[in-house]
Image (cartoon, grey):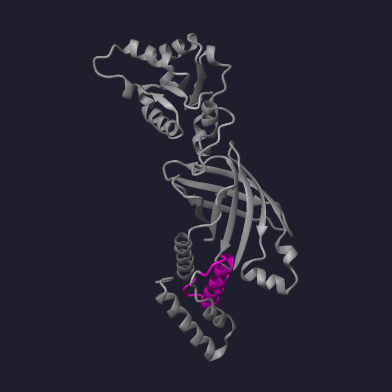
Amino acid sequence: MSLNPKIFLSHSHRDRHYATELQVILETHGAETYLDQDKIKVGDILPERIIEGINWCNTFLLIWSSRAAASAWVEKEWNTAYDSRKKIIPYSLDSTPLPNELQNLVRVEVNDQEHGDAVLLRAVFGKDFTPDPKTLFPGKWHASLDAFGVAQGTYDLELRENGQVEGMGGISNSGVAGQIAGQMGMNGLLNMRIPFHGSWSYNRGSKTLTINTSTDVVFGQQQKDTIRIQATGQEKGAITGQDLAGRTWTLRRVGERTQSRADDVKQEVRKQLQNLLDSARDSPVLAVLMAACCVGIQEKYKYDLGLPTKKAHRVMQAQGNAFQAAVKDFFQTLERGGWIK
């Protein structure tokens, strides 16, 4: 397949919005496209311009539906492409059967858009096509979990073209939970790698990646998570989002640069601390949770973020009147540092 495929998009005028969406996707990945609303001008001889476009292309994308099946122009277009022995890729918007001549062709289903347009892009660009690392697309990813700084986890997962997720991971021995586990001689337990599976989808309208995972039964329990990530396709090196419990997840493609910029890290830390404060404001253990979160976050990184970890340790260790004083000093320092509002 050419490095820059030339695509003719055949469609019913009633399916034009699908055609323009697919045009953007294909051009974003480097293809040239021929869409009638762009190429055919007032005064042009329509049949000549259509034939010219089909002769120009090396791939004919047939956007198929009940509307397309009823269109005389679409019928003429695919017949011309078929007679010219062009590569034809049917893109089905509904269950309308393909014409008899095209029955043996493998079609792309419209729900492929929920899986990063993986099948379409591989059909157009070839089976060895590798997407830009910044785009949402099936592949291997490394994920890290931060549960308010109290516990961290690491996961290796694969987003498959059919919408399935497979992976392996678990809670690591870092963070406050890791410290406690180490003191109890349970590091090996925390570092267990547990297989999980599930599904993923991408909503193009809201630009939201949703990953549903379910671990195998461990100690009589099955862990299920739903992770939703706002992903615009413009991220640099990583995409970040939260699961339904408010825990932060960061995903990076395998092989991507793993060190985030300090400003990005601090912004994310402020968000975590503020979320914890807002969600547990009336909790009697809020101060201890905030302190543990600060300590855990700082231990996660190899450079000083400027968090008041010494004062956080005082909160976790003090008792009685000393505890109240330590809490007041700790929260005042967080506010002065711009970590919380």
| Direction from residue 43 to residue 21 in the image, left or right | right
Numbered disc total: 0
Viewer-proximal residue, 90 or 236? 236
Residue 253 seen from this side: yes
Q: Residue 120, percent across and down?
A: 52, 30
Q: Residue 302 appears in which quarter of the rendering?
A: bottom right
Q: Which residues are magenta?
A: 280-304
The location of residue 92, given as percent across then percent down, is 49, 25
- The residue under the point 46% across, 83% down is 329
Q: Is residue 48 left or right of residue 83?
A: left
Quadrant of the drawing holding the C terminus: bottom left
Q: Report if residue 41 lies within the magenta region.
A: no
Residue 11 picture location, percent across and down: 40, 22
Residue 6 higher or lower than 198, as above or below: above
Q: Position of residue 6 (x, y in %)?
A: 44, 23
Q: Is residue 237 above or below residue 111?
A: below
Query: Can residue 65 be seen in the rendering of this structure?
Result: no
Residue 289 belongs to the span the image colors magenta: yes
> Secondary structure of the magenta portion, mostly?
helix
Location of the N terminus by quadrant is top right
In percent of the image, x 40 and y 25: which residue is there? Answer: 33
Residue lying farthest left? 43
Identify the residue at the far bottom of this view: 321
Query: As rendered, which of 19 and 330 lies closer to the eye?
Result: 330
Q: Is residue 102 above or below residue 20?
A: above
